[in-house]
Amino acid sequence: MVAKIAVIFYSTYGHVRTLAEAIAAEAKTTGVEVDLLQFPEILTEEIRGKMHAAPRGDYPDVKPDDLTRYDGFLMGFPTRYGRAPAAVSAFFDATGGLWAKGALIGKFASVFTSTASQHGGQETTALTTVPFFAHHGITFVSPGYAAADLTDINEIVGGSAYGAAGIACGDGSRGISEKELNIARNQATYFANTVKTFVAGKTALEKHAAGLTATEGAAAATTGAAAAGAASTTTSTAAHPEEGAPALGKAIPTESATPYTVDESTPAATKTPKENDATSEPAATTPATAAEHTPAPAQKETTPAPAAAATPAPAATATTTPAQQKKKGGIFAMCCGGNSSNYES
């Protein structure tokens, strides 16, 4: 962003106007935008004629609201009893609305003037203007003694640490000297660079802050999206538990899967009915004829075993056989269908 400066002046005999034009031209060389404006005149042309005032310049009059468009102001006006003329004071008084809104806070200002004599109020004119800047939050920029011509005593030179100045003589016959113009140009350069530096730094900070804000916003959006995704996953899993199960739990056997087989070469793989289990069926791997040709334990010697279908429920066996109370086959006998009497120690 390019800094904008307004050079605003009020001139009766042309001395301040000469300084203002030199200051505006020099400030432009620093790369800032410069507008040359005038304080509105409150005197009639009749009064100005009686004062033998110089014609006013063709520069536009400044309005209070115009001040908000600039980053800094270089204000020049002649002294009236050690302070600003009535026209300038009237303009200052018209800025109450800007003061109420704080519209000029953070801006910069500097002052230049013209007097009839060396001690006619060059410093006090600047000093009595500083309160106006202070109440608006405007920073007053003093050029100091950066200009070497300020300390040259080989001739009469206007100006001070508070700003450039001209000495017009009592009748206004003395014009602005070259040294006074140099002091004014030095003030213009110093002021313009000060404002430009501030504006550049402010712009850089705003861009940096905007970048941080954008980065934080993106990070927050990413975090929020991740949190929303996690919440959605949790909700979906709670509503459909099977979706959250491992893939192995949802696997469906296919024809290519290896089927479960039982090794029939060992007794453990053959399931036989328990003696006391009335509901037990013969093991799927034992032929039905084996049960038909096996005699019951009580009739081994005389009577062949009846068919499995005609065999009564072994209730009596359950009451006469104590094996039910002293099985020692352990887990192997129970799960594999073995007879516990075969595993007694």
Image: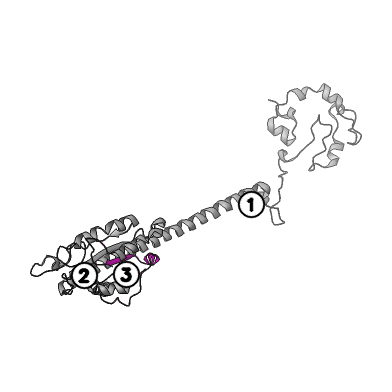
Question: Which residue appears farthest toward the right when viewing the image?
Answer: 310
Per the rendered image, the range of residues in magenta is 56-84
Q: Is residue 105 left or right of residue 246?
A: left
- Depth check, mark 3 against mark 2: the one in front is 3
Q: Secondary structure at mark 2?
A: helix
Task: From this view, report whether residue 137 is shown above or below residue 39.
Answer: above
Mark positioned earlier in the residue sequence (2 or 1): 2
Q: Which residue is mark 2?
A: 184
Residue visible at 72% across and 41% down?
Answer: 269
Q: Which residue is mark 1?
A: 247
**Disc 2 from disc 1: Cα separation:** 85 Å
Report crowding for label 1: few under 14, some 14 to 19, many 20 or more residues within 10 A (C-alpha): few
Does the segment drawn in magenta span residue 144? Answer: no
Q: Is residue 294 left or right of residue 54?
A: right
Q: Secondary structure at mark 3?
A: loop
Q: Give amino acid for label 3.
A: Leu
In front: 84, or 60?
Answer: 84
- Marker count (numbered): 3
Q: Give amino acid for label 2.
A: Ala
The image quadrant that residue 163 belongs to is bottom left
Task: From this view, report whether residue 51 is shown above or below residue 110.
Answer: below
Residue 126 at what x, y percent from top left?
Answer: 24, 61
**Disc 3 from disc 2: Cα separation:** 27 Å
Q: Is residue 210 left or right of residue 315?
A: left
Assign the C terminus to one quadrant of the image.
Answer: top right
Q: Are marks 2 and 1 in contact (CB under 8 Å)?
A: no
In front: 271, or 186?
Answer: 186
The disc placed on residue 288 is none
- Depth check, mark 1 against mark 3: the one in front is 3
- Depth check, mark 2 against mark 1: the one in front is 2
Report crowding for label 2: few under 14, some 14 to 19, many 20 or more residues within 10 A (C-alpha): many
